[in-house]
Image (cartoon, grey):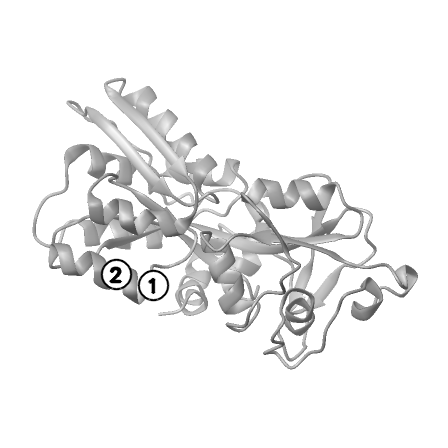
Amino acid sequence: MTLSAILRTTALSTAAVVGVVALEVDPKLKSYEPTTGITGTLISVGSDTLNNLMTMWAEEFVARYPSVRPEIEGKGSTTAPPALIAGTAQFGPMSRAMKKEEINAFEAKYGYKPFELKVAIDGLCVFVHKDNPITELTLTQVDSIFSSTYKFGGKPATSWEAVGVSAWAGKPMATYGRNSASGTYGFFKEVALNKGDFKSNVKEQPGSSAVVTAVAGDSLGVGYSGIGYVTSGVKALALAPAKGGKAVEPTYENCLSGDYPLARFLYVYINKAPGKPLDPMVKEFVKFVLSKDGQDDVRKDGYFPLTAELAEEQLAALEK
């Protein structure tokens, strides 16, 4: 089921969550209750987008279990599947879903698929400098800015005038993005570029924060990154579907409803053999992440928390 479909099925039952206070966690989420005897090394390898959040979760988990030692590495989503397959990490955070070939490689070794946890909701944003007068784009325009293949039917856009900023006639764009190891790169390529190719002049940055920092320091800049990295130096644009229509801002309500076109889940993958219990530390960390406490960290980090319904569904699946 697609993100939009999943979120639309929960939107009506979560009106209290997306009402007056947009960034409160679902009050139906359960608080985390610590247990005893949890120890070991908690190793996470994967997404840069989730690096801050994994660090926050690990720090709070260790505060409850001082015998646990965390090791968090965030060099890109493509590093998660190999680490899980090799057994060098228990957690593989990814800002995109695993690809079929990654799942197949895991299954070839273990005889079952990796267990997918949805841990947060993100609005992947197109950021411009705070002084840029533009407020919205269509996905066709986004594709025209970043792509060399124009699969949404647009034409090359290399100046701000080309996307309607007449006051900036003749001013060239400076485009910033992620490298191919990034799940954000992969998601943006698939959805915003309609599986097209990036232009060769997109300046690849080593992390999500670096993209936003680059745009904040370049008045002509435009880049893409998760909403959790927004700063006062940039603004996130409202986006309309490729065929036009109303531009939608990347708010919690719009991501939860699936109306924002670049809404996505953020994931953590684990090695869970069907019918067998999880390692106690792994299980408790997952329970913490999906609790009210863990989802409040999602809110604090600038992403959007899960609904209680989504959290409970995943906790139930862990018991199978």
Q: Residues within 10 Å of mark 2 (few under 14, many from 20)?
A: some
**Whether residue 291 is situated above or below residue 170 in the rendered picture:** above
**Whether residue 260 is situated above or below residue 228 in the rendered picture:** below
Nearer to me, 5 or 204? 204
Q: Residue farthest to the left?
A: 275
Residue denoted by label 2: 103
Tell me, yes or no, whether the two marked residues, 1 and 2, touch with CB atoms within 8 Å: yes
Give the image location of residue 84, x and y in percent.
24, 46
Give the image location of residue 302, x and y in percent.
55, 41
Spatial distance from mark 1 to mark 2, Cα to Cα?
6 Å
Q: In the figure, is residue 37 to the left or right of 127? A: left
Residue denoted by label 1: 99
Does the rendering let one see residue 143? yes
Q: Quadrant of the N terminus?
A: bottom left
Nearer to me, 89 or 19? 89
Three-letter residue code for mark 2: Ile
Three-letter residue code for mark 1: Lys
Q: In the figure, is residue 103 to the left or right of 17? A: left
Q: Residue farthest to the front?
A: 200
Q: In the figure, is residue 92 to the left or right of 85? A: right
The residue that appears at 44% across and 38% down in the rendered structure is 51
Does the rendering let one see residue 119? no
The residue that appears at 58% across and 40% down in the rendered structure is 209
The residue that appears at 48% across and 45% down in the rendered structure is 49
Give the image location of residue 261, x and y in percent.
56, 66
Give the image location of residue 162, x and y in percent.
81, 70
Nearer to me, 15 or 242? 242
The residue that appears at 21% across and 56% down in the rendered structure is 106
